[in-house]
Image: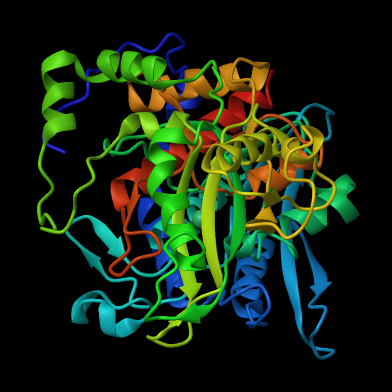
């Protein structure tokens, strides 16, 4: 980035021991890069939740690496329900414990990656190449999120090797299936092995940044994915006699087209919002540079792109209509249309409130709606639209709750001060629109689950890469945070 961030003097400068720890990271940067390359070269693709994909190799490799470095390790097998006897996923927990009791801190990351098609990647930056070019490492998982794990491993190793004392326990938990929502990883472990994975504080090392700015941020919350299917019912007929109002596809089209104006989802005021985000970026860049950053053009603009980048979207409940199916033949009026919508719901807005908004919107359109079992239907309660048949039936594809943690806990403050010391800039707090294993951890009763990782690009896309310098900085942040927190 050509625009420099304003540097600050950290509130808690480094003492000589901390200086020494951070310089150890520099001394071991080649080892860190080598480790990341090895991780990227091992295919650990996660195809889908219902298709078993062998991912033991990366867990065996990582476990062996950590064991050789002197950590206590444990691999927890979680059997794939539809699978043959040898089909299971592993969770890896590596830890080091002090003789003096104290706090427990956990580093966390997922070792699975999304699928890739090598044909879409450039010849010299293939998915399993881990090739290094211009200060970047390319490969599937380079950003999302083997770099975060490599940095955390290095931080753990250096804390141990430094022989600087600490209290309590530091552990690393690697999950196998974050990309498909963690049924065999985070969700399973918090339910069946809380004694292993529940710690006082957790740092997930997922590479994240706040669009359109690419710069380190601390993620303290996530929206809850609500993936819903809307089935529209209509009346079939001959295409030569159009049915404008009862054609199921037309109903769906009307539902989508009017939503921007009349679909009102309640807003939520959160302690982190567009205002606080802009405020902290102003501190980091100053007004002229921030404006430059926000208005810079993308390098290869797509002429079909009509949407502007929108920072405020992070703090709104959003929805996107992403799939539609209807019709059998060009001359038959469809009586059924299925529309899949991806809602991302802010914490503080529960599923019932979202369904109330959907029911109100349908009432405005004059459609009878049926909501999933277990939820109240405002239309039915109001006495309107009691009887079948309904125009629209809503069903759940998946629902996850959003969350927001308190950024000012004792651990949150340690992390913020370490951030200042390493990056020489004020921390910026934000929300993630995507989900991580953090949601499952919070649902399982864990608190203090923060997320900060290196700077990665093209996640889930071709030519994924991570900025190597940012992996080294992340390792410093993890090491300093762990050292200070476990010496409190
Ligand atoms: Zn990820």
Identify the residue at image location x=65%, y=71%: 59
In the picture shown, does residue 88 fall above or below 97?
below
Quadrant (top left, top right, bottom left, bottom right) of the N terminus = top left
Identify the residue at image location x=49%, y=25%: 18
Identify the residue at image location x=76%, y=84%: 87
Left or right of residue 359: residue 23: left
> Is residue 395 something one can see in this rendering?
yes
Q: Residue 177, image x and y in percent?
A: 64, 65
Left or right of residue 76: residue 148: left
Q: Quadrant of residue 234?
A: bottom right
Residue lying furthest bottom in this view?
A: 84
> Is residue 35 something one can see in this rendering?
no
Nearest the eye: 292 or 137: 292
In the picture shown, does residue 389 fall above or below 277?
below
Left or right of residue 51: residue 158: left
Q: Residue 64, image x and y in percent?
A: 65, 70
Nearest the eye: 92 or 186: 186
């Amino acid at each position: 980035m050509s625009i420099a961030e304003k540097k600050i003097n950290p509130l808690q400068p480094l003492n000589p021991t901390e200086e020494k720890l951070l310089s150890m990271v520099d001394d071991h940067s080649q080892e860190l890069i080598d480790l990341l390359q090895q991780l990227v070269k091992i295919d650990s693709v996660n195809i889908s939740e219902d298709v078993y994909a062998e991912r033991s190799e990366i867990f065996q490799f990582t476990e062996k690496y950590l064991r050789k470095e002197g950590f206590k390790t444990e691999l927890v097998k979680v059997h794939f329900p539809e699978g043959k006897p040898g089909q299971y996923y592993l969770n890896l927990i590596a830890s080091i414990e002090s003789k003096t009791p104290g706090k427990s801190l956990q580093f966390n990351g997922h070792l699975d990656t999304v699928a890739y098609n090598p044909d879409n990647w450039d010849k010299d930056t293939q998915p399993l190449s881990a090739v290094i070019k211009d200060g970047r490492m390319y490969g599937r998982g380079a950003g999302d999120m083997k770099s975060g794990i490599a940095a955390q491993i290095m931080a753990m190793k250096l804390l141990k090797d430094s022989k600087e004392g600490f209290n309590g326990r530091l552990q690393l938990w690697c999950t196998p299936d974050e990309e498909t929502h963690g049924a065999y990883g985070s969700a399973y472990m918090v339910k069946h092995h809380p004694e292993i994975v529940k710690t006082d504080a957790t740092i997930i090392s997922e590479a994240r940044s706040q669009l359109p700015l690419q710069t380190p941020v601390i993620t303290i919350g996530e929206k809850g994915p609500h993936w819903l299917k809307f089935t529209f019912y209509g009346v079939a007929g001959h295409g030569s006699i159009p049915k404008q109002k009862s054609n199921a596809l037309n109903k769906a089209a009307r539902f989508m087209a009017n939503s921007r104006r009349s679909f009102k989802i309640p807003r939520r005021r959160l302690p982190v919002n567009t205002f606080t985000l802009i405020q902290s970026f102003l501190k980091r860049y100053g007004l002229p540079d921030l404006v430059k950053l926000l208005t810079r053009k993308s390098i290869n603009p797509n002429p079909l792109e009509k949407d502007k980048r929108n920072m405020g979207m992070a703090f709104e409940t959003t929805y996107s209509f992403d799939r539609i199916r209807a019709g059998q033949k060009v001359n038959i009026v469809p009586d059924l249309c299925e529309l899949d919508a991806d809602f991302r719901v802010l914490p503080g807005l529960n599923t019932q409130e979202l369904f109330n908004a959907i029911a109100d919107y349908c009432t405005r359109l004059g459609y009878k709606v049926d909501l999933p079992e277990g939820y109240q239907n405002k239309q039915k309660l109001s006495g309107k639209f009691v009887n079948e048949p309904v125009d629209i039936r809503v069903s759940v594809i998946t629902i996850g709750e959003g969350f927001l943690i308190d950024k000012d806990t004792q651990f949150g403050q340690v992390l913020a001060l370490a951030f200042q010391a390493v990056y020489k800039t004020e921390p910026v707090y934000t929300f993630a629109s995507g989900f991580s294993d953090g949601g499952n951890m919070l649902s399982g009763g864990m608190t203090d689950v923060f997320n900060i990782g290196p700077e990665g690009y093209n996640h889930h896309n071709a030519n994924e890469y991570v900025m190597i310098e940012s992996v080294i900085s992340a390792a410093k942040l993890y090491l300093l945070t762990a050292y200070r927190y476990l010496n409190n």
